[in-house]
Image (tube, rainbow, N blue to C red):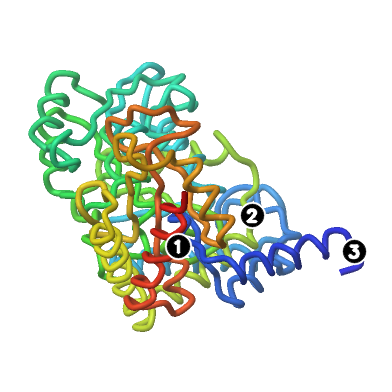
Amino acid sequence: MKDSQVSKLIKAEKARQKKATNLIASENYVSKDVLEALGSELTNKYAEGYPGKRYYGGNSVVDKVEELAIKRALDLFKLSPDEWHVNTQALSGSPANLSVYVALLEKGDKVMGMSLDHGGHLTHGHKVSATGKFWTQVPYGVSKVSEILDYDEIESIALREKPKMIIAGFTAYPREIDWNRFREIADACGAILMVDMSHIAGLVAGGAYPSPFPFADIVTTTTHKTLRGPRGALIFAKKDVRALYKKIDRAVFPGLQGGPHMNQTAAIAVALKEAATSAFKKYAAQVVKNAQALAKALVDLGWRVISGGTDSHLILVDVWMDGKGIGGKEASDRLEAAGIIVNKNGIPYDTRGPVDPSGIRLGTAGETTRGKKEKDMLALAKKIDKVLRKA
């Protein structure tokens, strides 16, 4: 690279990533093939529109790229093209979710999503997000006792509030979700059921977590977390008499975006092929094994793990412990100084603010990509414990 300044920064970040132990739950490491596609000449092509219906010329190749990504997405999650449609153009998870809102809701409609402080995402209707400014969030959370979802309470809220759409799938909830129960709740109040599986998509693809597709109307996901692809998003929609998928396509383009990033689409296609392998299935299973081993080790060392454990790649740890420990920000800073990267995170019914909450969030997807196993998680738990308890 001729630009020495940028080249130096890239090398510095590469060195940082290589040196650090990465427990950011929303990060992973892509393959060289994904990077090659992402940095390819496809970057040069402006492809406004959809395959066969572009607004510019010269799209004979990129049409095939997008069609390949679509086919691989459907194949990976064992979906029939007669029953499901997938849009590969959303630039990331938040625009993908916003596209669904714009497509299917009127301004002010009620959307039932998990509270941010209980593990939901900003785009599930939080007030600081556009989804909370133009639509009305009906929040739900977890039980104060068990710290897991109380489906009877969720149903009670849904029947009382009658939301237009219910969102299941979270950013800081470690347990297995009962998709069928959410389907029953949505049917009971006449709501559309949208699942945001951004965090668990790779686990679903690898058979390490139950699939939401038999139950959902809409499924959105990022492609860069457990799915181990580039930063991007997919929107799946059922093909039925409601034709929701046509509305979603129009919301993505021309509603919210112009031309898609075809280099990103190609890189997603590469990642989807990788996720369809037997090696990836073993990887997904190991991600969960590692998370469960890390969670158990932390509990054994005296730390309070939210809900007592995990069924996924994600662990939420209460490091404040009613004043007996330290704040989430200090915990994150201490660990980063020791070469372990996590993020501070609120916990359910947190008594501290979001700038310095009571918890930290850990994830095992990235370190599993690097070949870590359960024994490594035990050693890592001991190191975390030592760093956090240091006076």
Q: Amino acid at mark 2?
A: His
Picture quadrant of residue 126: top left
At mark 2, the secondary structure is: loop
Pointer 3 residue: 4
Residue 212 versus residue 88: which sits nearer the camera? 212
Pointer 2 residue: 261
Q: Amino acid at mark 3?
A: Ser
Between circles 2 and 3, the one closer to the viewer is 3
On the image, the x and y values in percent for residue 248 come to 43, 40
Between circles 3 and 1, the one closer to the viewer is 3
Residue at (11, 31) in percent of width and height: 155
Residue at (31, 55) in percent of width and height: 84
Residue 201 versus residue 100: which sits nearer the camera? 201
Few, some or many residues within 10 Å of mark 3 (<14, 14–19, 20+):
few
Residue 112 versus residue 145: which sits nearer the camera? 145
Q: CA distance from mark 1 to mark 2?
A: 15 Å
Picture quadrant of residue 44: bottom right
Q: CA distance from mark 3 to mark 1?
A: 38 Å
Pointer 1 residue: 70
Residue at (55, 34) in percent of width and height: 255
On the image, the x and y values in percent for residue 133 come to 46, 19
